[in-house]
Amino acid sequence: MALRQAVLATLLDGPATGYELAKLFDAAIAHYWHATAPQLYQELSRLEQDGFVSAAHVTQHDRPNKRVMTITDAGRAELERFAGESSKPPAFKNDVLVKVRTADVVATDPLLTGLRDSLDQCRRKLDSYLLMEHRMLKGRSHDEYVATARRVGPYLTLRRGIRYEQENVAWLVDAIDVITRRADRRSPQEART
Amino acid sequence: MALRQAVLATLLDGPATGYELAKLFDAAIAHYWHATAPQLYQELSRLEQDGFVSAAHVTQHDRPNKRVMTITDAGRAELERFAGESSKPPAFKNDVLVKVRTADVVATDPLLTGLRDSLDQCRRKLDSYLLMEHRMLKGRSHDEYVATARRVGPYLTLRRGIRYEQENVAWLVDAIDVITRRADRRSPQEART
DNA sequence: ATAACCATGTAACGAGTTACATGATTCC
DNA sequence: GGAATCATGTAACTCGTTACATGGTTAT
């Protein structure tokens, strides 16, 4: 039930629509909180009812109308309360690791194909994170940024995402290598790409 | 809906009871698949109905009776099928990152207290992973192990967990440092532990 | 004595996913 | 002409969490 707080924490960066939040939860926030669009629209309605966000209806002519959500003082107080609460252990769901655990039991080729695919996606995610970091830093060094920026929260969480994806890439490269070499040893006549 | 496969993949290491699986999902598997005990008991019933596991009822005298679950050939075939499927993007839920994102907006002291707590837990988790690795390697080097072990899946996933927790510890130490120093600058008269 | 461990489950509730519904505009 | 982007939501369903229920053994 910390979806509320994840949404409120995101709105600290400024007002946003449900649609914009959905994109953010698919990008910058994906490495620590997963949520789908219908979930966000529903949660925003609840947050509005509870007075944690206020909605501004914006009429547009070239595009569909939208509802821009802004965090209220009650919303900030809720984050304050949440920060003082003890944290639940994190919850992860990662198919790729489940599949790697079945190596040596399942066929090697489809497994490797899937892993190469995951590696591609991790690299793309990493690139997008590094681009965000570049835009945040605007030429400043890490030390300069954490000493002078108005807020460091979004930067610190982004750094965690970057390190996570870097580890992911390194691990996948290694896992693919290990699994490939073991497969080669078992059937040396077969060439593997 | 990959809980099934996560359970089946775990049963590749040998038969286990629901209770043992619950402990594993809280320890060695926690970094890639979260599940609670009631969920596992329910899923095991379904897996049995579908013929992916077979249950052996073991009567005990000093302890409660138990049901030992073994993966069947149909279960292995299901893992085979799953390994060939394309993977869903991983789903994460991590309160700690949500809280860090609110730094500079919420009170510093309760936030830091929570982060030190998380750091403690990460270190304990890391220690337990390193112990598991030590037991798995039995004195062999990484290269020796991946070249000669019967299966490498459990080792590869464990390595991912170790690196994840190492990064977590390093990141938390840094985040605590950054947040503490910024708080000191804003109120230098106040001493911080 | 009291807590922790072993061991299995159900029931009620809350959270999350998927499919569906709509419709204009802009890019290829 | 077709896909992608902008934009919001509902409804049906599945999944996951929490509380409850039981009860013996072992360690402090």
Image: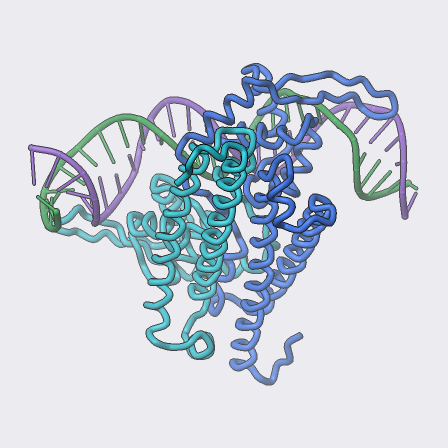
Chain colours: A cyan, B blue, C green, D purple
**Nearer the observer, B178 or A127:** A127
The C terminus of chain A sits in image quarter: top left
As drawn, the residue found furthest toward the front would be A189
Q: How many numbered discs, if any?
A: 0
Q: Residue at x 37, y 41 (%)?
A: A36
Give residue D11's quadrant in the image.
top left
Q: Where is residue A128 in the image (x, y as percent from the top left)?
A: 34, 57
Give x and y (percent) for residue A26. Answer: 36, 48
Figure quadrant of residue B88: top left
- Above or below — where is B66 with respect to A5? above
Q: Who's the residue at 49% across and 66% down the image?
A: B103
Instruction: Depth check: give the residue in front, A140 or B161.
Output: B161
Query: On the rendered structure, is A56 left or right of B161?
Result: left
**Residue A78 visible at all:** no
User: Residue B23 versus residue A75: which sits nearer the camera?
Assistant: B23
Residue at coordinates 42% horizontally, 55% vertically from top-left? A8
B57 to B88, vertically: above or below: above
Residue B10 location, x and y as percent?
61, 32
Tell me: B114 left or right of A193.
right
Which residue sits at x=64%, y=35%? B150
Above or below, comparing residue D16 to residue B164 in the picture? above
Q: Looking at the image, can residue B170 be seen?
A: yes
* Percent of width and height locating residue A34: 43, 45
